Image: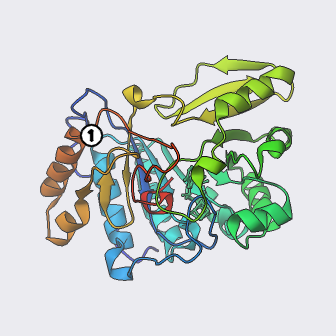
Amino acid sequence: MTPYDSSAAPTPAARHPLVDGFGRTVTYLRVSVTDRCDLRCVYCMAEHMTFLPKAEVLTLEELDRVSSAFIGLGVRKLRLTGGEPLVRKGFMDLVEGLSRHLRSGALDELTLTTNGTQLARFAGDLARHGVKRINVSLDTLKPDLFRTLTRGGDVAAVIAGIDAAQAAGIAVKINAVALKHDNADEIPSLIQWAHARGLDMTLIETMPLGEVEADRTDQFLSLEQVRRELASYWTLTGLPLNTGGPARYVRVEETGGRLGFITPLSHNFCEACNRVRLTCTGTLHTCLGREDASDLRAVLRAGADDAALVDAIRLAVDAKPQGHDFQIARGEAPATRRHMSTTGG
Ligand code: SAM
Ligand code: SF4
């Protein structure tokens, strides 16, 4: 039983899909359900973060309503993220409510990105509500380094979470941020570990989002360089997998596993971009790397009916920028002031 009415069908506005000014159809929505987190990864958050007052964060009902409006407009894949989605109170009620769109066939996939610390507790419920695949962020298997990178996290809890998810039948993809001084040497063994467990793995370049203490130009490790090194001893076969996102995939023939590279700084991936992001405060960002924003919370809280909400969404998507503008040169300000934990990774 959910604490709010989640029985409503998607809003009946799906006659025309969401197409932006450059002809790209938006079919993928990422929703950040909280800015809070039980970890403080050095590249993501400042050590002492000031989190948002509760009143600024969308309620579970509001999150359901906006997500459902997007689904009514043709979004087929919904990713819940954060902050850490599993620390949001009532999160599983939200998942349970949204799972009605899976059952109705309106949604192809309901998924989440998590740090995995709470997964052991929630994996069974996620599977029961139709979640079939999740991304778990894990940058190192070394307990000490993990504790340092996350400012206090316990890698054993994450591994127990991954075990629980796999036991529940959920496919897990590992996301690791490549960090020059911290995990560069460990990347091959991390890939081997993931592939030996039947997990896909994706490497991510650090992105200049939000002010943190660490110097990102110092942390930055080009994945082109990583790929060249891996290719010097492994056979990497390109895969024609197009997710509409910034990842490119290869098969590592020696391990038999799939490896993705997310290189927002090395490559432009914007032409085929099919995604938009909603922050936990109801701000819609149609581009991760720009300051463009539409305040859907204001629309919701002004008492908008479904038609007005749909109009606001269409207006925002229509103005989706053609491409991002990331820079990571020394001394540059972050491309956006938002932290990844606010926008939702
Ligand atoms: N807490 C969850 C987690 O860690 O998976 C979900 C939110 S987190 C912001 C989503 C992803 O963003 C994580 O994989 C994290 O490593 C990545 N991330 C955070 N800050 C980043 C940055 N500045 N550059 C690149 N990736 C970043
Ligand atoms: Fe939390 Fe995820 Fe950011 Fe790490 S990357 S601090 S786990 S939100």
Is residue 132 among what the camera can see?
A: no
Q: Please name the residue shown 66% across and 18% down the image.
A: 238
* Residue type, numbered disc 1: Lys
According to the image, label 1 marks what residue?
320
- Residue 130, given in percent of the width and then of the height, sits at 56, 53
Identify whether 171 is placed above or below 95. Answer: above
Front residue (pair 276, 123):
276
> Which quarter of the rendered image does ligand 1 occupy?
bottom right
Identify whether 230 is placed above or below 280. Answer: above
Q: Please name the residue shown 24% across and 42% down the image.
A: 317
Label 1 neighbour load within 10 Å: few <14, some 14-19, many 20+:
many
| Res. 16 image quadrant | top left
Is residue 230 among what the camera can see?
A: yes
| Res. 138 image quadrant | bottom right
Q: Please name the residue shown 35% across and 34% down the image.
A: 323
Q: Residue furthest front?
A: 331
- Residue 162, given in percent of the width and then of the height, sits at 75, 56
Query: Secondary structure under badge 1?
Result: loop
| Res. 147 image quadrant | bottom right
Front residue (pair 225, 238):
225
- Residue 340, given in percent of the width and then of the height, sits at 49, 57
